[in-house]
Image: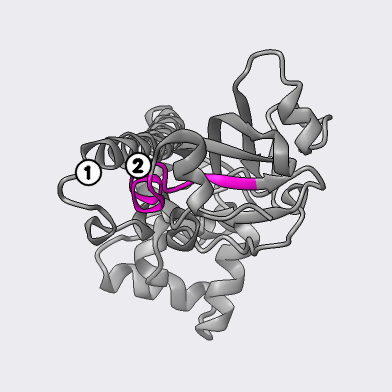
Amino acid sequence: MIRRDDYVIKYGISYDWLKQIFPFYLLISNENKLLDKGPGFAWLDVKLEVDDCISSTFTPFYFFKELTYDFIKNDSDEEVVFTDHQNSFTLKGKAYFFSDVNSMLLLTSISIHSPEIANKIQSKNFEPYNQTLDMIFLKAMQEAESKKSLALIRKLEKRARDLAEENKKISSGRVFVNGEKIKQIRQSKLMSVDNFVNHSIDRKCYLSKSTIKRAEAGVKVYFKTALDIANVLDVNIQEILQ
């Protein structure tokens, strides 16, 4: 088993420095088991414990492969890229090998895809003197924020398209109404057609009996008529449009 002091012997770095500069490092045995991990995984609430098999949490960028010690060691790009199974973040890093104890130290940076995960990372996690760590997380959170903004833009674009469709219907002068829904609401208010006419007069809409019957038959009516019907029924016009 490799000792933490071996980091210093092998690479000339201290254990504290390693945690600060590479908070997402992984120490992996040749049996694909996790021997040690950086503190960053605790910030992300990742269920990754010592002695766990790394493939139980992570998947290589080439998803048809399995994340193993040999896969990382033989990666032709010398840099391994993998994600968690939920695809909420990606780790990218380079492996350094302890051949005498058959293990590797994988030093990684992170890209966060999930705004929810980015929001969990607070400034209290940063060491104020550690600019490298700050920059890693700043970039990760900017990427997550961009994805959130893009989702909002897509939502607004869809709403704009929906409004354009509604305006197109209205601009034609006549609209289709849901006659069955109008009749259902009228009857739920215990109104006969004659009562409906009287209510429309009280509301200064002046709807005729024939107009109400046409609407309940689902025939196209003027948009103003649809507004008047909604007014008498005390509902939003969207509830009676088809």
Q: Is residue 126 above or below residue 130?
A: below
Residue at the outermost top position: 76
Nearest to the observer: residue 138 or residue 170: 138
- Which residue lies at the image location 46% right of the left edge and 38% below the top edge? 110
**Residue 195, image x, y percentages:** 45, 78
Magenta stretch: residue 24 in it?
A: yes
**Residue 130: image tag:** 1
**Residue type (three-letter) at the residue carrying disc 2:** Ile
Q: Is residue 35 left or right of residue 158?
A: right
Asked if marks 1 and 2 touch (Cβ < 8 Å), the reply is: yes
**Residue type (three-letter) at the residue carrying disc 1:** Asn
- Which residue lies at the image location 55% right of the left edge and 50% below the top edge? 177
Q: Is residue 158 above or below residue 234?
A: above
- Stretch in magenta: 14-27
Q: Which residue is mark 2?
A: 21
Disc 2, SS = helix
Q: Residues within 10 Å of mark 2 (few under 14, many from 20)?
A: many
